[in-house]
Amino acid sequence: MLIGVPSEIKNNEYRVGLVPSSVRELVANGHQVLVQHNAGAKIGFDDYSYELAGASIGESAEDIFRVADMIVKVKEPQLSECHLLRENQVLFTYLHLAPDPEQAALLQKSGCIAIAYETVTDKNGGLPLLAPMSEVAGRMAIQAGATSLEISKGGSGILLGGVPGVAPANVVVIGGGVVGTNSVRVAMGMGAKVTVIDKSLERLYHLDLQFGSKICTIYSTTDSIERYVETADLVVGAVLVPGGAAPRLVTREMLKRMRPGSVVVDVSIDQGGCFESSRPTTHKDPTYVEEDVVHYCVSNMPGAVPRTSTFALNNATLPFILALANFGYKQAMRLDSHLLNGLNVCKGHLTHKAVASALRKEYIPADVIIK
């Protein structure tokens, strides 16, 4: 199979779909890899390093999309890239289609086979290709929030960990999954007072076992979210509905009652966001202020640390990329139901229930399409 790796073109996105060691693995399995010129240059992988691994170099994205059987990316295809996709071409990347009807329509129109990292599952019900970026984003959320609390950034001028004689910041994390757990760990390590809110008692139990009395675990209700958000200095939104749109758990009325200069970091923004006032931002212009609250809503947070993120992502995606290349997408999905769960669009049809529901479009089960 010929696998194409184009440069990422989203704002300030420097991650790359394959690192040279992954290319070498694919070549050793008898496949060809075509990497766009300078695709990995910003994170220390020049064209020569890819050529040493056995890849060929293409000058433009058009070159890559025109000949590749499978496109491996990091972020969702931008509109210009959607127009380059063709019928029966496999696209393997993050898609986040629920809040993006335009992208979904273009993928359907192209006739491609679009497999989303974020909906591939594992035997434990987890999301193994989303987890590494969730770990990065969760840790970065506290870092970004702490910076945004500085007075020069529009914040209220609070040091997250306080100092002797001065109370630390109140940090509230909504959602106790991978993002939330990593946010809790970093916030706690920086000395903040941390509360995590989740609707799963089992998840709260595990967090309590992991962190003990150093954090406060609260069962999620409208009342509890309202009470803890209003007194928080920093709120991290870390809720997830696999494939679907994130629920808007924090209303404008709640934000209005927060102290001016408080900060919200919406890690759920790539699925639409969990704050009523959220809208996507970029690393170039990451924050805005509404209701006197600083909003950090960058939709590709791990892109700020692209070298770490790229290695972490490749560690997780490579086995699935090899399966798709070795067996073809149909056979690979017949052999692995977890990979099948990643199929979002196939030859014009939406094949993931949560995505179709969010977009209010017709849904055809992935296993029916594959058969």
Image (cartoon, grey):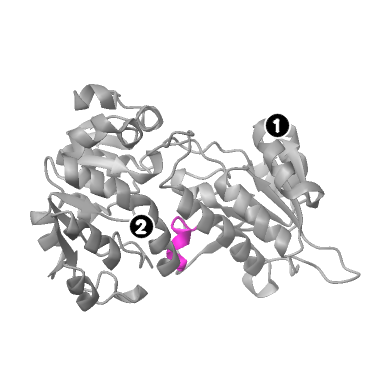
**In this orientation, does residue 46 appear?**
yes
The answer to whether 310 is drawn above or below residue 206 in the figure is below
The amino acid marked with disc number 1 is Thr
According to the picture, the residue beneath numbered tag 1 turns out to be: 221
Which residue is disc 2 drawn over? Answer: 314
Q: CA distance from mark 1 to mark 2?
A: 37 Å
- In the rendered view, does 63 fall on the left or right side of 278? left
How many numbered markers are drawn? 2
Rendering coords of residue 192 (x, y %): 76, 60
Which numbered circle lies on residue 371? none
* Residue lying at 49% horizontally and 49% vertically, measured from the top left: 269
Residue, x 44% and y 33% (percent of image)? 123
Looking at the image, is mark 1 or mark 2 earlier in the sequence?
1
Q: Which residue occupies the foreground of this view, 2 or 58?
A: 2
Q: Which residue shows up at 77% across the image and 41% down it?
A: 227
The image position of residue 186, as x and y in percent, is 66, 60
- In the image, the segment drawn in magenta is 298-305
Residue 347 % position (x, y): 17, 34
Q: Quadrant of the C terminus?
A: top left
Of residues 301 and 183, the one drawn nearer to the viewer in this rendering:
183
Magenta segment: does it hold 327? no
Residue 277 visible in the current orientation: no
Residue at 69% in and 59% down: 187
Residue 104, located in which quarter of the rendered image?
A: top left
